[in-house]
Image (spheres, helix red, strand yellow):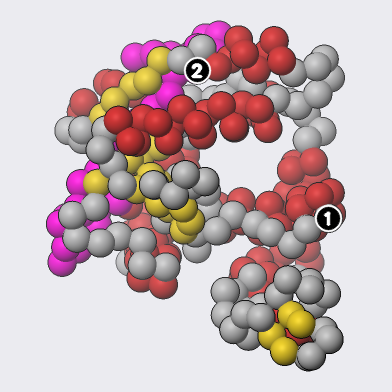
Amino acid sequence: MDTKKQVIKKLQRSVAEAIKQFSMIAEGDKIMVCLSGGKDSYAMLDMLMYFQKVAPISFEIVAVNLDQKQPGFPEEVLPTYLSNLKVPYKIIEKNTYKVVMDKTPEGKTTCSLCSRLRRGTLYEAAKDLGCNKLALGHHRNDIIETFFLNFFFAGKMETMPPKFKNDAGDLVVLRPLAFCKESDIETYAAYQEFPIIPCNLCGSQENLQRKKVKQMIADWEQEFPNRNSIMMNALQNVFPSHLLDHNLYDFDNLETKVTENVL
């Protein structure tokens, strides 16, 4: 099997495992696939289109891009790509770029505010389109990096769950690439020659905490191969009685408040 077929199979197996393990897709679902123009969201769309063809159940997908009116954003790229792909799609135009630039103090990163504005807009779009689920393109590396960002800088043990409900409780959010390696996605994107659209906000900012954590994890992986797989397994193998959270474990009566060894 050539390298291209190998990486396709690896991604398909990883997505299939995430879909199965976290019961992501059910009969009759209508899933809004958030397409940013980056390698991850392109790969996610390809994977969901593949499973739409081979799955024993029927579900709909609609690709959605939020045009945030960033300077130089190539507006024609995604409509052309999606039209050629013959997938239902919608482009939402909203000038969140101006809001982010106006509200973010000089020298501060734009990622947090940009993410909140984008997420709220996409949630509304999903409801307007009649979607009951929304898919985001975060992969295994994103999940591990987020855990360490929260651990080191926010003082909490939390990461990106593969499946959760929004705050309003009326929309299920999925991360079908949760078990996919970023390196495999990069290889796949190169083979597919996706028309990548760079981000002129967060993508251009240097010295972000995430970049430092990303480099730290990459160094670990180089020194101790397979470290990322071990860390991903750890996030699915939690023992509340061996932590310090009173909300998870009753230290007075030495009784667990949640089921041990369950994600």
Examine the rendered structure and indicate whether residue 242 appears above or below residue 123. Answer: below
Q: Counting other residues with Cα less than 10 Å from the Cα at mark 2, is it few (<14), some (14-19), or many (20 or more)?
A: some
- The local secondary structure at tag 2 comes to loop
> What's the distance in space between the residues labelled 2 and 1, CA to CA?
32 Å
Q: Is residue 243 left or right of residue 256?
A: right
Asked which quadrant contains residue 97, the reply is: top right
Q: Is residue 63 magenta?
A: yes
Q: Indicate the quadrant containing the N terminus: top left, top right, bottom left or bottom right.
A: bottom left
Examine the rendered structure and indicate whether residue 252 appears above or below residue 182. Answer: below
Q: Is residue 211 left or right of residue 257?
A: right
Which residue, given by chain and number where applicable, does mark 2 sit on?
A: 68
Q: Is residue 46 magenta?
A: no
**Residue placed most toward the observer, 198 or 256:** 256
- Magenta-highlighted residues: 48-77
Residue 68 image offset from top left, x and y in percent:
50, 17
Name, please, the residue furthest toward the bottom: 254
Residue 102 image offset from top left, x and y in percent:
69, 10
- The local secondary structure at tag 1 comes to loop
Which residue, given by chain and number where applicable, does mark 1 sit on?
A: 155
